[in-house]
Amino acid sequence: MQKVTAAVIWRNGAVLIAKRKTRGSLGPTWEFPGGKLEPGESPEECLRRELKEELGLDARIGRFIGGFPFHSASLSIELLAYQASIQEGDFVLTDHDEVCWVRPDELPSFNFTRPDFPLVRVLIENAEDL
């Protein structure tokens, strides 16, 4: 099972989401930024690297939120979600068409990738605790 990381980054009661490129894999759906672990890499190292590569951001990785397994005919992953905060950098989009800050109650109106659904539910139900 492939391990994939996801960052939950808050600002003023809103969480950062990113829209995958239309012509790319799973595009144009929304997701929490992150990516696949490389051999020998910790989830925190992976998430820090992915945020830099995909969004141009230096981030501090915080507490683990949870692991969310997803299985389909073509994909078997475990999404590892962490709180994160932006330390510096300006958005430079390489793998996404846009980013957006949304309140938890707005998340259901976005077309998320299927592996992100459980994390969306957790954020809606527990936003005040995260």
Image (cartoon, rainbow, N blue to C red):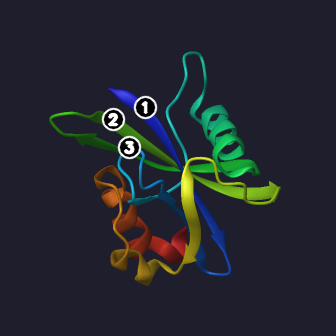
Residue corresponding to mark 2: 77
> Of discs 3 and 2, which sits in the foreground?
3
| Category of crowding for the residue at label 2, using alpha-carbon neighbours closer than 10 angstroms: few (below 14), some (14–19), many (at least 20) | some
Question: Furthest-right residue in view?
Answer: 88
Q: Is residue 18 or residue 38 the one in the foreground?
A: 18
Q: Quadrant of the N terminus?
A: top left
Cα distance between the residues tagged 3 and 2: 15 Å
Q: Are marks 1 and 2 in contact (CB under 8 Å)?
A: yes
Q: Is residue 100 or residue 37 the one in the foreground?
A: 100
Compared to 119, does 78 lie above or below? above
Residue corresponding to mark 1: 3
| Category of crowding for the residue at label 3, using alpha-carbon neighbours closer than 10 angstroms: few (below 14), some (14–19), many (at least 20) | few
Compared to 123, does 71 lie above or below? above
Q: Is residue 51 or residue 27 the one in the foreground?
A: 27
Q: Secondary structure at mark 1?
A: strand
Residue corresponding to mark 3: 25
At 41% from the left and 75% from the top, the residue drawn is 107
Compared to 55, does 39 lie above or below? above
Q: Secondary structure at mark 3?
A: loop
Viewed as shown, does residue 125 lie left or right of 76?
Answer: right
Q: Quadrant of the C terminus?
A: bottom right
Amino acid under label 3? Ser
Q: Secondary structure at mark 2?
A: strand
At 41% from the left and 49% from the top, the residue drawn is 23
Amino acid under label 1? Lys
